[in-house]
Amino acid sequence: MDIMEPSRLLSLPKELRLDIWRHVLTDPSRDKLVLRIYRKPHSPSTPSVRYSNSRYKNKRSALPQIETAFEMQRSCPVNVNLLMTNRSVYEEALPILYHSVKFCPWDLGGVFPFFLQGLSSFARSHLCYIKLYTYRCDSSPFYWPIICSDLTSLNGSLRQIEIEGDWPLTSRVRKRRTLLCPLLRIDASKKLVPAHDDAFQQLLADIEDEREAKAGLQNSVTAKAVAVAVTEAEAVECEMPIESRKREQDVQELPIRKKARWDDPPPIMPETNIVLETNMVLETDMVLETDMVLETDMTDMVLETDMVLETDMAPELETISLVEQFEEDLSEWDLVSMDSCLSSPIIRPENGFSGEAFTRSASNVTREDDDDLESEDWEFVD
C-alpha cells in the first residue's frame, strides 16, 4: 500500500505560501477593490402559484437574495477555488482575499445583515474595511442609522470606514448630527474621501464632545434625582413614629418568626409546666366569667324587649278585644236557614222584621225569578 506523500506546496515555508496566495487572489495594480453588496432584483419570469383565493402570486423567497459585484473590474482574474482546497489553505488564504477588498453596503434597506449571515464566523472576523456613500444617505435617511447599527456587530475586527461624499456634508446642523452621530457608535477609524478629511475629523471630534457633554449632564441630573429621593426617604423615615416603625419591623419579621415556630418549636421545660397550668386555669376562669356576663346581659335585654313590646302593642290588643266582643254580639242575631226553613230558637224583638213586611217584599219578585230552580226552596215565614 502506497503511503500518500505530503504536499510539496504545503511543505513550503508559510511566508512563501502567503506570497503565493497573495499573487493568486489579489490584483497588484490596485490597492483595494470595492465590492458592492445589494439586493438581487426579482426576475419577471418567476413562476406563479395559484392560491385558494384564485389570485396568482409570485413564488418568491421570504429572504432577500444577495448579489455582489466589483465597482471596477480586475485587471487579472481571481481563482477563488483555491479556498476550497483544504482547511489549512482556507485559513491562510481567506484573510488575504478579504483584506484586499472594501465591502460596500450598496443597498441600505437592511440587506447587510443577510450578507453577514451567509458568511462563516471566521470570514466575518476578517471584514476589516467598509465603504459608505453619503449621497446614498440623502436618498435613504431612514436606513443610514440602521446600516451603522449593523456595522457595530463587527466592532473588534473593523479597521477603517471610508466615507465618500461632497464637502461640506450639509449646511443644516440637525442633518449633520443625523449623519455623524450613528458613525460614532462604530469602533473603527473614519476617513472622508476624496478630500477634506482634516475638517471631517474636526467635525467628528466636535460631535463627540457634544455627546459626552450631554451624557455628563444626563448623568449628573440622574445622580441629583437619586440623591433627592434618598434624602426624602431618610427624612420620612426619621419623622416616622417609633410605634409605626416597630409595627413595620414586626410585619417584616412575621414570616421569619412563623417559619422558626413551625420548623423548630421550642421545647417545654419541666419548670414551665406550672406556669402553663396556671395560664390555662386563668384562661378557663376568664372564659366562664365572660359567659356568665353574656348570659346576664342577654336576660336583661330579653326582659327589656318584652316590656317595650307590651307597651307598644297595647292599642293593638285593645282593638283585638273590641273585635272579639263585636263577633259575640253578632252571633246572637236571629239567622234563618234558606234550605230548612227552620227559625232560630232565639226570641226576636217585637220591632224586628215582621212576616207581613217580608211577604210584601217577596211579592215584588218578578216572573223570571219564579222560573228559577232555586225559587222552589223559598218559603215565607208567618
Image (tube, rainbow, N blue to C red):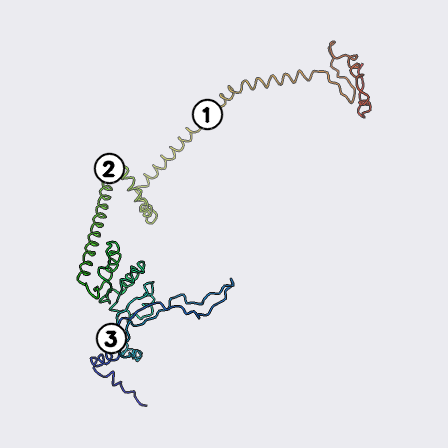
Q: In the image, 306: left or right of 150?
A: right
Task: Give the mark, 3 or 1, whose residue is nearer the N terminus.
Answer: 3
Question: Nearest the camera: 23 or 75?
Answer: 75
Mark 3 surroundings: few (<14), some (14-19) or many (≥20) residues within 10 A: some
**Disc 3/disc 2 C-alpha distance (Å):** 72 Å
Q: Are marks 2 and 1 in contact (CB under 8 Å)?
A: no
Quadrant of the image containing the C terminus = top right
Q: What amino acid is at disc 1?
A: Met
Q: Secondary structure at mark 2?
A: helix
Residue at label 1?
301
**Disc 2/disc 1 C-alpha distance (Å):** 49 Å
Whole-percent x and y of residue 80?
30, 78
Residue at label 3?
96
Q: In the image, 64: left or right of 340?
A: left
Residue at label 2?
239
Whole-percent x and y of residue 177?
24, 56
